[in-house]
Image (tube, grey):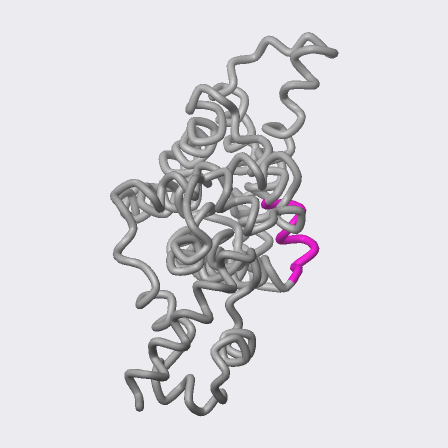
């Protein structure tokens, strides 16, 4: 009986995929002519069904999906991305796409981790935790610049999407935002707090300190093409962001009398 239900569910799911429809548990159960209870008796989750529909994706599939998603998000933002169109452009089946990325939140998180400065910056800070801010902060600025501009094609679309999605905090981006905050505060935030406690930096909320550092650098990166074409900016990119980091260091220098929190 269980084997028969399994075959009917798999057949119904394949039919839905062939027609380009979503694979919700309710839709699959209806297509298979079984109850939701029977579905969960056969497959413990929707993910288990997707696992049964297709063998392990070929090598490079995840990277190809993320590269395609990077282009689509950079061009129109996360909200405009269609998972069906993404699967078609990446040359993968819907089942494969949803196995690797169950939805837009997981997709956006994957893109941020693969292509944003997030992980390179956290790795840098973790490796330089014992160094003073005068050494670490300019290196963070250089790393951000190299990630955004050093790949041949500037990743300004992704940078714009990050600013837009995290400021609007849509349901699709909230999961990625929480992941981003957890990672940043676990590395850069904790480093800043340690440096404040040691008296090397002005004491303030670490979120404000991060915003004070990130804001000018992101603004420079986003407006740099305009500044170069229209205003004739001819300052080297790394030099520019390092100067911004040094400005941050001057602003974060503790008062001679000593800072108090608040």
Q: In this view, does 199 lie above or below 5?
A: above
State the residue at coordinates (60%, 8%). Answer: 234
What secondary structure predominates along the stretch shown in magenta? helix
Where in the figure is residue 185, as x and y percent of width and height? 45, 58
Left or right: residue 137 versus residue 252 is left
Left or right: residue 116 versus residue 212 is left
Q: What stretch is highlighted in magenta?
A: 162-170
Q: Quadrant of residue 174?
A: bottom right
| Quadrant that contains the C terminus | bottom right
Q: Does the segment drawn in magenta span residue 177?
A: no
Q: Is residue 118 above or below residue 109?
A: above
Where in the figure is residue 226, as x and y percent of width and height? 70, 18
Left or right: residue 136 versus residue 253 is left
Is residue 193 visible in the rendered image? The answer is no
State the residue at coordinates (56%, 32%). Answer: 247
State the residue at coordinates (63%, 21%). Answer: 224
Q: In this view, does 233 lie above or below 179?
A: above
Q: Which of 257 and 67 is in front in this view?
A: 67
Where in the figure is residue 250, as x and y percent of width and height? 54, 36
Is residue 171 visible in the rendered image? The answer is yes
| Quadrant that contains the N terminus | bottom left
């Amino acid at each position: 009986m269980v084997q028969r239900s399994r075959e009917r569910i798999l057949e119904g799911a394949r039919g839905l995929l062939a027609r380009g429809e979503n694979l919700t548990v309710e839709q699959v159960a209806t297509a298979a002519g079984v109850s939701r209870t029977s579905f969960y008796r056969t497959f413990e989750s929707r993910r288990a069904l997707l696992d049964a529909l297709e063998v392990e994706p070929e090598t490079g599939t995840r990277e190809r999906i993320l590269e395609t998603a990077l282009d689509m998000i950079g061009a129109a933002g996360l909200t405009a991305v269609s998972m069906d169109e993404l699967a078609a452009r990446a040359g993968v089946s819907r089942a494969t796409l949803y196995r690797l990325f169950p939805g837009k939140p997981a997709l956006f998180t994957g893109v941020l981790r693969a292509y944003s400065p997030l992980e390179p910056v956290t790795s840098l800070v973790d490796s330089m935790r014992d160094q003073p801010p005068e050494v670490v902060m300019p290196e963070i600025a250089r790393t951000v610049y190299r990630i955004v501009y050093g790949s041949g094609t500037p990743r300004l679309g992704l940078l714009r999407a990050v600013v837009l999605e995290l400021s609007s905090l849509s349901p699709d981006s909230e999961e990625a935002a929480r992941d981003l905050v957890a990672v940043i505060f676990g590395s850069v935030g904790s480093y800043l707090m340690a440096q404040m406690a040691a008296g090397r930096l002005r004491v303030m909320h670490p979120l404000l300190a991060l915003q004070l550092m990130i804001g000018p650098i992101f603004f420079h990166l986003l407006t740099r093409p305009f500044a170069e074409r229209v205003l004739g900016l001819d300052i080297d990119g790394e030099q520019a962001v390092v100067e911004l980091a040094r400005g941050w260091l001057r602003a974060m220098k503790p008062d001679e009398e000593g800072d108090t929190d608040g």
